[in-house]
Amino acid sequence: MTKPRLEVSDENLIIQYDILNAKSSDFFMVWIEVTDAAGNKIKALSVTGDIGKEITGGKNKRITWNLGNDSILIDEDISVEVKAEKIIMQEEQAETEIPEETKTITMDEGNMDMKEISKGNMILSSVVLPGWGQSKTNTGKPYWIIGAAGYSCLAGSIILNLNSSSVYDDYKSEMDPDISNDLFEKANQRKNISKYLAYSAIGIWAADIIWVLATPVKSSGSTGLHKNREFRIVPCFDAGSNIAFVSVTFTF
């Protein structure tokens, strides 16, 4: 800032100054400090012009001080000093506080997330193998167990269904009534278990896809959002009632 240039016009004191080497995006807080010959401060209240907040840089800045309104005599010996302080915008403050290396890493990770991981990709992966979609955003956790449970239920359903058909064929060809009744009961029992396992597999796939839909898309190395969460899908069978079911537990 240059030394102020003073000019008296009627009851007004014209104060001119320049703010040099400032960018067009720079803003300043400008104020004046006035003292008398003894060094006592004088309050300049009736001031207008390039003073106050959000003053841009440049030449020929002008402040008008009405001396009459503030009861200041023109013949008094006074000293005027113009001061300015650059206003730090929020964006500039953020750039100042964040190291350049940190900013670069954050931007790179953000671009990587958008390119490599998408919600559609996660859903498609979980359709192929339950748990695969979650593993794309949370590495190092055994989400493959969900897929293993799903395919185990599916495989068990297929095997028991085929076995039920085979036992039913034996039932139709068996002539002994007692053996025939026993084979018929076994065929129905295995057919029912096959259905329950099929329902369990469908439940595992559906629950996993719902979980994927509710999972935020983030980097594969970040696990902060799910650090305290636990998801379990366990196929079960009650031998007493001959009922197969699946237990789903999700801890928030």
Image (cartoon, helix red, strand yellow):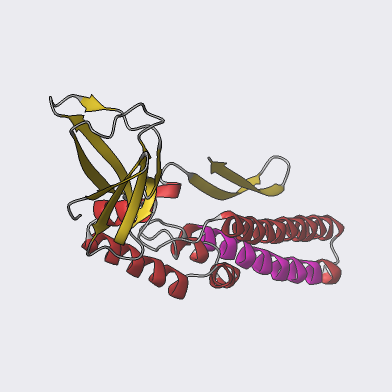
For the stretch drawn in magenta, what is the main secondary structure?
Answer: helix
- Tell me which segment is drawn in magenta: 146-170
Residue 230 shows in this picture: yes
Residue 248 placed where, x, y %? 60, 46
73 lies above or below 235: above
Q: Residue at x 24, y 36 (%)?
A: 33
Q: Residue furthest bottom?
A: 115
Q: Is residue 192 magenta?
A: no
Q: Which quadrant does the N terminus fall into?
A: bottom left
Q: Nearer the viewer, residue 157 or 107?
A: 107
Asked if residue 87 lies left or right of residue 190, the reply is: left
Q: Is residue 169 magenta?
A: yes
Residue 134 placed where, x, y %? 49, 60
Q: Residue at x 18, y 24 (%)?
A: 40
44 lies above or below 130: above
Q: Nearer the viewer, residue 115 or 156?
A: 115
Q: Residue at x 67, y 69 (%)?
A: 158
